[in-house]
Image (cartoon, rainbow, N blue to C red):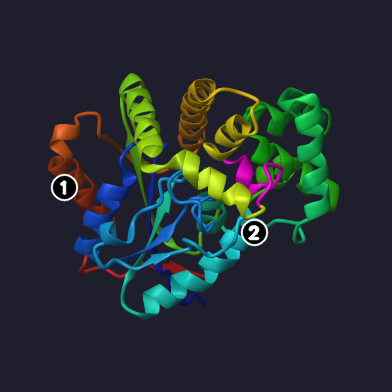
Amino acid sequence: MTQAVKKPRLLVLMGPTAVGKTGISIEIAKLFGCEIISGDSMQVYRGMDIGTAKIKPEEMQGIPHHLINIHDPQESFSVAEFQQRCRKLIPEITARGNLPFIVGGTGLYIESVCFEFEFSENGADEAFRQEQAAYAEEHGAQALHDRLAEIDPPSAKRLHPNDQRRVIRALEVYHMTGVKLSDQLSGQNKQSPYELCFVGLTMDREMLYKRIEARIDQMLEEGLVEEVRNLLNQGYTPGMVAMQGLGYKEIAAHLAGHVSLQEAVVLLKRDTRRFAKRQLSWFRHMNNIHWVDVSDVDRSDEHTREVQNIIAGTFPADMEYTSTT
């Protein structure tokens, strides 16, 4: 005998950095009664606001936001913790009569929740992370990446050498479990406990790159250098995983006297463009994403309506979603 089991709904908005997720997410959240869960692996850190393009309280317009400012920079945050917290948040939001809404650009984190990936990791090894960061500082990012290429070639191919935070995490997973991160990911059974609606925002590549560069210029005007200086003065060292995030490692290198500010900005813009490219590559390997091209920024209202229509078509108000088990 089969028994109908309701699947809770889960809305997801994804896209590369600087594509415009924040603005559309607020409008959609107001239309559909959503609570937003940040799907960004860096916005969890307190005091790291400008470099992560963290939404400001006044920009939230009263929409509840979760998984922002939940850790100090010296604390670890992993995909497993993100998954665990979302497993708790989603039914709580649903029970309040609201729609859970993940918004972000960290593809692995989003997929881990939507398809209940199983990870054989157990916590974190901070000493190992510091050791790898020190190795990279002494021998260079490429040397650290070469270490990963030796033990986990698929992960090394997916990660750029300058993405030191994730390179270290991939090394750490193997160090702690003896299982390659790529093997963990390839063995996942992509069945979802949720009724999903995936919306992706995309944009002309050159336009996206110009927006990225303009955003970084704005971050500098808003005080990115001072933000990084304050973090360093509080004792957060460049080798910490959080401080390896885009914007922080480049400015920290400048403040240490290794590069000029101009050189740091050039590196930051280059690395952020490369990061956006990798984000898009990850999303394009995912199925069932409804893509919305937001290249014409003067038509933002139309883009919001297009997203609205996609959601309304996936989650009709007069239907309940069920599965049989």
Residue drawn where x is 21% and y is 52% of the image = 308
Q: Which mark is residue 47?
A: none
Q: Which mark is residue 305?
A: 1
Q: Is residue 106 visible?
A: no
Q: Position of residue 295 (x, y in %)?
A: 24, 29
Secondary structure at badge 1 equals helix
Dominant secondary-structure state across the stretch colored magenta: loop
The three-letter code of the residue at mark 2 reads: Ala
Q: Which mark is residue 80?
A: 2
Residue 131 forms part of the magenta stretch:
no
Rendering quarter of residue 126? bottom right
The segment highlighted magenta reads 236-245
324 relative position to 95: left or right: right
Residue 238 forms part of the magenta stretch:
yes
Foreground of the two, 64 or 3: 64
Residue drawn where x is 21% and y is 63% of the image = 30
